[in-house]
Image (cartoon, rainbow, N blue to C red):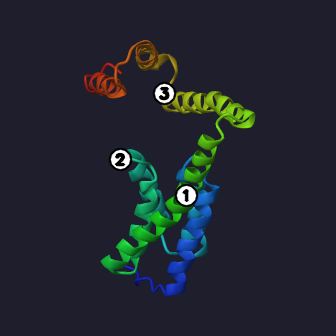
Amino acid sequence: MSAPLLLGWDDWASLFVHFLMLSLMQFGGAISVSADMQRFLVEDKGWLAQSQFADAIALAQAAPGPNVLFVALMGWHLGMNTGSPAAAFAGVALTMAGILLPSSILNYQVAQWGHRNRELRAVRAFRLGMAPIVIGMLLATSWLIAGAGSQTSNWPLWLLAAVSCLVIWRTRLHLLWMLGAGALLGALGFV
């Protein structure tokens, strides 16, 4: 086992400020700035091992819940590398507050402004223009996830996705029923 990290108040402040700045650069979620997190935590500071960094992302992607949890895992690993469980909680608090606060406040303020000015032509145009972009990003993500194997061997998955889209579009059935049906079909080996 390597020697525990010795972090001073300036190091903790540096961690917090760095994650504050990353928060304002994250378009597409915290995962979009993970390369800079890796550079800062692994390469520049040496506070995390590359394996700890990769494991945090892999675990957060595999676990249910928001993907931003990998940031909490990085803070946890950093604190545990100091040898103190209390520092692990401090690492979680600092990284999560840093990555969430600025973007949340900015989103809230912009949403309030947009709601107050919803009749402005520019606001309406922005909302109308964002809809196809969001749909395109969701379709691209679906294509990447479903395309892990060859496209022809995934025909049951594509069929399930198409049927799910039609059911959601044409009925008022809650999305959780679709997720449950997909999970059941996957557990039974159909998709």
Residue shown at 59%/55% (left/top)?
106
Image quarter of residue 77: bottom left
Residue 105 is tagged as: 1
Q: Position of residue 175 (x, y in %)?
A: 37, 26
- Between 64 and 44, which is closer to the camera in this rendering? 64
| Amino acid at dot 2 | Ala
Q: Position of residue 109 (x, y in %)?
A: 59, 53
Mark 1–mark 2 distance (CA, rounded to whole Å): 26 Å
Element at badge 2?
loop
Mark 2–mark 3 distance (CA, rounded to whole Å): 18 Å
Q: Earlier in the sequence, mark 1 or mark 2?
A: 2
Q: Nearer the viewer, mark 1 or mark 2?
A: 1
| Amino acid at dot 3 | Ala
Decide if residue 28 is on the left or right side of residue 2: right
Q: Nearer the viewer, mark 3 or mark 1?
A: 1
Mark 3–mark 1 distance (CA, rounded to whole Å): 34 Å
**Which residue in the structure is indicated by mark 3?**
146
Can the viewer see residue 80? Answer: no
Q: Earlier in the sequence, mark 2 or mark 3?
A: 2
- Between 10 and 50, which is closer to the camera in this rendering? 10
